[in-house]
Amino acid sequence: MSTQLLANWMRHGVISEQDVDDGLRRTAAVLDERLRDEPGHRPLLSAGEASLAWQAARELILRGATAPNGCTEPVLYRFRRRHKARTA
């Protein structure tokens, strides 16, 4: 699903922030299970703390309604920089 679609649903009260968090956790669990044996896979959820990928997806949804023209690049760029700093 598009983060912009979900942001729009939040804006109009169709879903809540809790719904977003619950959905992201369920999705992350499914993806982690399916990809666990893939070389280089980093779990989206580990030790109860969300990965940068999970945090970025969440922010794109929660802030999507206020992003100029729905622009995702600033959020993605910021999280890529955080990832590079962690792995440097």
Image: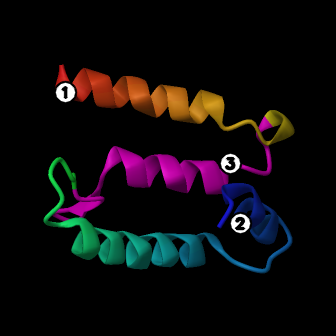
Rendered residue at 64%/55% (across/down): 62
Q: Nearer the viewer, residue 81 or 33?
A: 33
Q: What's the distance in space between the residues labelled 2 and 1, CA to CA?
A: 30 Å
Sequence order check: which comes first, mark 1 or mark 3? 3
Q: Residues within 10 Å of mark 3 (few under 14, many from 20)?
A: some
Question: How dense is the environment of label 1, judged by Cα within 10 Å: few (below 14), some, or many (20 and up)?
Answer: few
Lateral position of residue 3 relative to residue 54, left or right: right
Query: Which label number is shown at residue 63?
Result: 3
Residue picked out by circle 2: 6
**Quarter-wise, where is residue 54 in the image?**
bottom left
Q: Position of residue 75 (x, y in %)?
A: 57, 34
Q: Give the crowd class for mark 2: few <14, some 14-19, many >=20 residues within 10 Å.
A: many
The magenta segment is 43-67
**Distance from the alpha carbon under mark 1 to that under mark 3:** 26 Å
The CA distance from mark 3 to mark 2 is: 10 Å
Query: Which residue is labeled 1 in the image?
Result: 87
Instruction: Give left or right: position of 7 versus 45.
Output: right
Q: Are marks 2 and 1 in contact (CB under 8 Å)?
A: no
Depicted 83 relative to depicted 81: above or below: below
Residue 4, how many percent across, how many down? 74, 56
Q: Residue at x 40, y 79 (%)?
A: 26
Q: Is residue 17 above or below residue 40?
A: below
Residue 9 found in image quarter: bottom right
Colour theme: rainbow
Q: Nearer the viewer, residue 5 or 66?
A: 5
User: Could you say whether the residue bearing mark 1 is in a helix, strand or loop?
Assistant: helix
From the top left corner, tell me how far across and down residue 52 is, in percent: 36, 44
Give the mark nearer the N terminus: 2 vs 1. Answer: 2
Residue 28 percent coordinates (x, y): 36, 69
